[in-house]
């Protein structure tokens, strides 16, 4: 499969940086064609500009500022995202990718004022993430980052596409053993992706 890997972390030496390298390495080892999109390294701008907002619904002009990213998204068969949870959401880099690239004509169409998701080239999704807080704390507030993937993204891609959400919770109290165990879990998931 052609897999678009979306990574958002400013520090390559971070745990998420290591997870990102692991994901790319294991997918490639299994013969996938990997498009490794490291948003910080590529200098992606997450800011939706005034012109982009004005042209948002004009299919054609709306794609121009991010045409390269749209092409990469549309060429992909699968999506793997690797990022830390920040403020119970995506890092701004990744949120900005959704704002600027998941456009009308790309991820959805408007039909009689209703959103019709259409990113049906994406047939499989995996998320690799980490939280500073515990699973209990995330669950207590409704786990918004998990819902953004399992409920929001899920209805945008091909109906019935398999999703996996792999999270290391409680990073604030993590140990080499917990981090290593999660790396193994991620490696195993990528081996059968
Ligand atoms: C700006 C920022 C916001 C954060 N917000 C949350 C949060 O809302 N919930 C949470 O559980 N952890 C939060 N964290 C903790 C990160 O999830 C944690 O630092 C990260 O998973 C550790 O991975 P890293 O070492 O690769 O950065 C936040 C961290 C930062 C830097």
Image: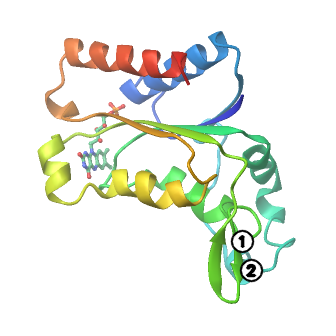
- Residue at the image position 65 percent from the left and 38 percent from the top: 78
SS class, disc 1: loop
Mark 2 CB lies closer than 8 A to ligand 1: no
Q: Is residue 159 visible?
A: yes
Q: Position of residue 112 (x, y in %)?
A: 70, 89
In the rendered image, the residue lying farthest to the right is: 60
Give the vertical position of 161 relative to 106 (above or below).
Answer: above
Front-lying residue, 6 or 47: 6
Give the quadrant of residue 171.
top left
Residue 77 image position (x, y, % from top left):
71, 39
Is 75 rendered above or below residue 97? above
Q: In the image, is 93 to the left or to the right of 19? A: right
Q: Image quadrant for the N terminus?
A: top right
Q: Quadrant of residue 188?
A: top left
Label 1 crowd (10 A; few <14 / some 14-19 / many >=20)? many
Tag 2 secondary structure: loop
Q: Earlier in the sequence, mark 1 or mark 2?
A: 2
Q: Is residue 140 above or below residue 183?
A: below
- In the image, which disc is placed on residue 187? none
- What is the number of the mark on residue 57? 2
Residue that appears at 72% across and 71% down = 104
Tag 2: Cα neighbours inside 10 Å, few (<14), some, or many (≥20)?
A: some
Determine if residue 46 is in view.
no
128 left or right of 103 in image: left
| Mark 1, residue position | 104
The residue lying toward the viewer, choosing from 133 and 118, is: 118
Ligand 1 quadrant assignment: top left
Q: CA distance from mark 1 to mark 2?
A: 6 Å
Residue 125: where, in percent of width, then height? 55, 40
For the C terminus, the image quarter is: top right
Q: Residue at x 36, y 19 (%)?
A: 185
């Amino acid at each position: 499969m052609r897999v678009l890997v979306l990574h958002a972390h400013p520090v390559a030496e971070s745990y998420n940086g290591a997870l990102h390298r692991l994901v790319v390495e294991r997918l490639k080892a299994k013969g996938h064609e990997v498009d490794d999109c490291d948003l910080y390294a590529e200098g992606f701008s997450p800011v939706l500009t005034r012109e982009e907002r004005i042209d948002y619904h004009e299919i054609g002009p709306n794609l121009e500022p991010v045409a390269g990213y749209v092409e990469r998204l549309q060429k992909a068969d699968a999506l793997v995202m690797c990022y830390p949870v920040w403020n119970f959401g995506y890092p701004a880099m990744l949120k900005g990718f959704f704002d600027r690239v998941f456009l009308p004509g790309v991820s959805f169409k408007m039909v009689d004022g209703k959103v019709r998701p259409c990113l049906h080239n994406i047939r499989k999704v995996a998320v690799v993430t980490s939280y500073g807080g515990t699973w209990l704390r995330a669950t207590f507030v409704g786990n918004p980052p998990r819902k953004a993937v399992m409920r929001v993204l899920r209805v945008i891609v091909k109906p019935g596409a398999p999703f996996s959400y792999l999270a290391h919770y409680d990073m604030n109290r993590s140990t080499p053993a917990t981090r290593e165990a999660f790396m193994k879990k991620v490696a195993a998931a990528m081996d059968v992706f």
